[in-house]
Image (tube, rainbow, N blue to C red):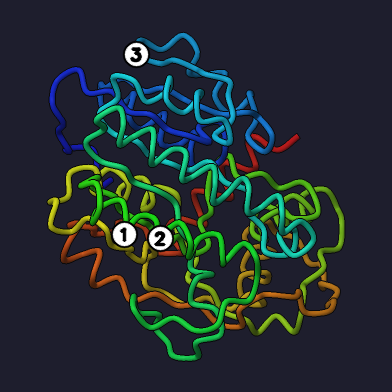
Amino acid sequence: MGYLNLQFEKNSVFLVTGGAGFIGSNLCEAILNLGYQVRCLDDLSTGKQENVDFLMDRVGYTFIKGDIKDLDTCMRACKGVDYVMNEAAWGSVPRSIEMPLFYEENNIRGTLNMMEAARTQGVKKFVYASSSSVYGDHPVLPKVEGQEGNLLSPYALTKRADEEYGKLYKRLYGLDTYGLRYFNVFGRRQDPDGAYAAVIPKFIRQLLHGEVPIINGDGKQSRDFTYIDNVIEANLKACLAPSEAAGEAFNVAYGGREYLIDIYYDLCKALEINVEPVFGPDRAGDIKHSNADISKAKKLLGYDPDYDFASGIALAIEWYKENLK
């Protein structure tokens, strides 16, 4: 894994917001495994206590139940912290279309609260989750930073706003911010349940439980599916990135392109299950094709992902086989 040899100052303290979520819990675990202290901040609205229960007895781990929409909570959580990884946000394009006001409050104001707290408390680096959704309807592949189209959902708008605040906080206040545009992250501890669950764990759960999965659209949409350990690497390397690279946003992906229908049949083959899917309507706000150019992250962050889709999906399948009830 490309982050195991990274070194920070002794006794470094990390704050991971949304730390009980899929990406956040994996970040907390990785930081502890490197020998540093981590604070996990989560209001458990979408994160799950069970994702971090196994960390509770680890030396250097602290759990704070709190909401990033509350500035005082953010201030207290950032006190004495060296690095912030802001993963706290509500995902899901379709849900954001149903709940635009909540997404503005949580994803924009919450992130702004965290940036302000980090600035006030003297945090060294502020790394935050953005999204490939900021590319909107721009048709060109691969997606390159600086070539964005019209936004297609309130969720995408919140992430674009976060990036603009990230630029401002670097320019106005000198806070080193790094936005990571995640492309369809998957892997261990990703929630397979609920109407807005990510497609890979949802398919795996349905197939293992004898259900018939529904594919939205014709299945010919493509994505740059990105294994969780690549995302961990990007976050940690952003914390070590030069100040000259701050105020920018970076694609975080592998740089591949997988078609949804192919993934479905690959999962069926791996699980030794033969079930034809049902095709449903396209989802509002979805991008048809998504594939990342990761050269900027490679150059400025030193990002060099280890896991292509094939190696990542094999690990994910094994995890779900062992952990799905």
In the structure shown, which secondary structural element does the residue marked by tag 3 occupy? loop
Q: Secondary structure at mark 2?
A: helix
**Residue 236, percent across and down?**
27, 42
Q: Label 2 neighbourhood size at 10 Å, few (<14), some (14-19), many (20+)?
A: many
Q: Quadrant of the C terminus?
A: top right
State how far apart marks 1 and 3 are (Cα): 32 Å
Residue 225 vs residue 123, the one in the foreground: 123
The residue sitting at 54% across, 51% down in the picture is 108
User: What is the tally of numbered marks visible in this picture?
Assistant: 3
Q: Whole-Å distance between the Cαs marked 2 and 3?
A: 31 Å
What residue is at 58 percent from the left and 36 percent from the top? 69
Q: Position of 198 compared to 249: left or right?
A: right
What whole-number distance in Å separates the C-alpha atoms at marks 1 and 2?
6 Å
Above or below: residue 20 compared with residue 194: above
Secondary structure under the numbered disc 1 in the rendered image: helix
Q: Residue at x 83, y 78 (%)?
A: 279
In this rendering, the answer to whether 267 lies above or below 126 is below
> Which residue corresponds to mark 1?
167
- Circles 1 and 2, Cβ within 8 Å, touching? The answer is yes
Q: Give how far across and how far down residue 155 sits, in percent.
A: 62, 62
Give the labeled residue for mark 2.
163
- The amino acid beneath tag 3 is Gly
Instruction: Tell me the kind of residue under disc 1.
Output: Lys
From the image, tell me which residue sits under label 3: 60
Picture quadrant of residue 261: bottom right
Instruction: Please identify the residue farthest to the bottom as the structure is shown.
Output: 139
Residue 280 percent coordinates (x, y) = 85, 76
Taking the spot 13% from the left edge, 26% from the top edge, the residue there is 9
